[in-house]
Each structure stands twice: as C-alpha cells, then as structure tokens.
Image (spheres, grey):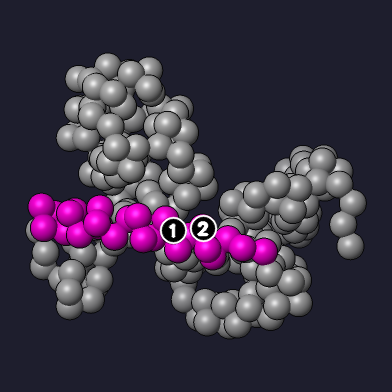
Amino acid sequence: MAKRGDPSVLRLVVIFLRSHARMTQEQFGKACRVDQAQVSRYEHDEAPSEEVLRRMAKVAGIDWSLVVHLRQFYSSLLAAASRGDAGPAATGLDLPILEPVLLALSPYWIELGRVESEVQPPAKARHEADLIWSALERYPAQRRRQLIGLSLQVSRSWALAERVSHESERMAAHKVEDALELANLALAIAEQVAGEEGLRAQGYCWGHVANARRVGNDLSGADEAFVRAWDLWRAGGESD
C-alpha cells in the first residue's frame, strides 16, 4: 500500500495542482514560495511537506479536503494496480501508462467531489449512512478505510461518522479493541467534515473514543478524550 508521504503519489498531486493552475514550474514555484528546481524535484522523486502542499493547493484554487482525497485516490489506485486487483483495465499497467490516465481523470474527480459535498437533509444522510455501513461492515478494518477513502461523499459524511460511532458503542460490550478501532474510524471521517458541523461531529466521535478507552480501562486516555469532545462540541455551537 502506498504511504501518505510516498513520492510516487505526491508527485502526481503536485503535477495535477500545477497543471490545474496553468503555470510553468517557475511560475508555480514563485507563487508557492519555492524555486523552480524544487518544483521539478517534487514532480520526480522528492515528497513535499504538507505545508508546501497546502500552499500549492491554495495557489491552484483547490480546497484542501479535496487534495487530501485526491492523494488517497492516487494512492489506492496505484497500490491496487501494483497488486493486480484494480480490475482488468488497470491490471499489469506500468506506472508510465497508468499515471497519465489518473492525471486525465483528476479534474472530473475533483468536480465530482464538489458536487458530492452538497448538503443533504439529516434524515436522508442518516438513511444513506445506514446503507453504506451495511455494505462496509463485512470487510476487515483496513479494507473499510480504503473503501471509504475512495469516495468524497462517504469519507466526509457526518452521518456515517455518527453511524460508526453507534457501532463502536455497541461493540464496546463485546470486544474493546474493535470498539476503539471503530471510534477512531468515526473520528477520522468526522475530521473531514467542514465547518461547525465538522466540529460537532468530531466532538461526538471523541465522546465515543472516550467510551471505548474507558471500557478498555484506559481511564486517563478516556478523560483526555472527554475533554476534547466537550471542547469541540462547544466550538461547534448548539445542535439538535
């Protein structure tokens, strides 16, 4: 599996961002406060820091949450292609062939992500979260995370974070390790939700992290998580 800071993944992110900005390496580097030679290295074999990547996203006019998911999109597909389980179209493709395909698809994927992020009524969001979880729960933990990461709508759904939190609460009575893993998964989803809604979702999920830690007899960790939960919930304002 490609790692978060894998240069083979990040080079594609940098190439896409510069292409989206319609800039030369020199122009892009100047706008991002790095020199042209450094941009060239980023596009070949050197991973940029997250700070630099954030500056590049801002210059390209791409929301940071979309860049995070674009990175996951590249990582998942490159890893799947290398294992031979990305489907017949990608199986056995060399990176020089696959990379241009991914870059060509990226603008459409970004636009799809913007459309998918439109707000849904709470009842509909919760119904979809139930359906998504019923499809995901049979997979092992790591595979669930990978599948969630491939969809912007799923991976930043407050309703799915809430649903997974409830599953963590249910699991706490049976297997503490699974309860904590689920609570952390819910929190990872909530951290992708924007605005006050995201703060409330994180607060809600931190409460379930605290519960799982308490059941696992990590009392100091539970206290810390409860404090985080309360601070985030207050920061998010009142909610029904």
Q: Is 27 or 239 nearer to us in this picture?
A: 27
- Is residue 94 in view? yes
Q: Main secondary structure of the magenta part?
A: helix
Q: CA distance from mark 2 to mark 1?
A: 5 Å
Residue 143 pos. (x, y %): 42, 68
Position of the N terminus, as image quadrant, is bottom left
Q: Residue at x 61, y 63 (%)?
A: 118
Q: For the residue marked with disc 1, what is the amino acid?
A: Glu
Q: Residue furthest front?
A: 22
All told, the count of numbered labels is: 2
Q: For the residue marked with disc 2, what is the amino acid?
A: Arg
Q: Is 225 or 23 nearer to us in this picture?
A: 23
Residue 41 pos. (x, y %): 20, 27
Q: Residue at x 32, y 55 (%)?
A: 106
- Is residue 167 in view? no
- Whether 4 is drawn above or below 131: the answer is above
**Residue 240, image quadrant:** bottom right
Residue 110 pos. (x, y %): 42, 55
What residue sits right under mark 1 in the picture? Answer: 111
Q: Which residues are magenta?
A: 95-119
Q: Residue at x 68, y 69 (%)?
A: 120
What residue sits right under mark 2 in the picture? Answer: 114
Residue 32 part of the magenta-drawn span: no
Dot 1: what SS?
helix
In-image side of 104 versus 208 (left or right): left
- Whether 15 is drawn above or below 143: the answer is above
In-image side of 226 versus 150 (left or right): right
Q: Residue at x 24, y 56 (%)?
A: 104
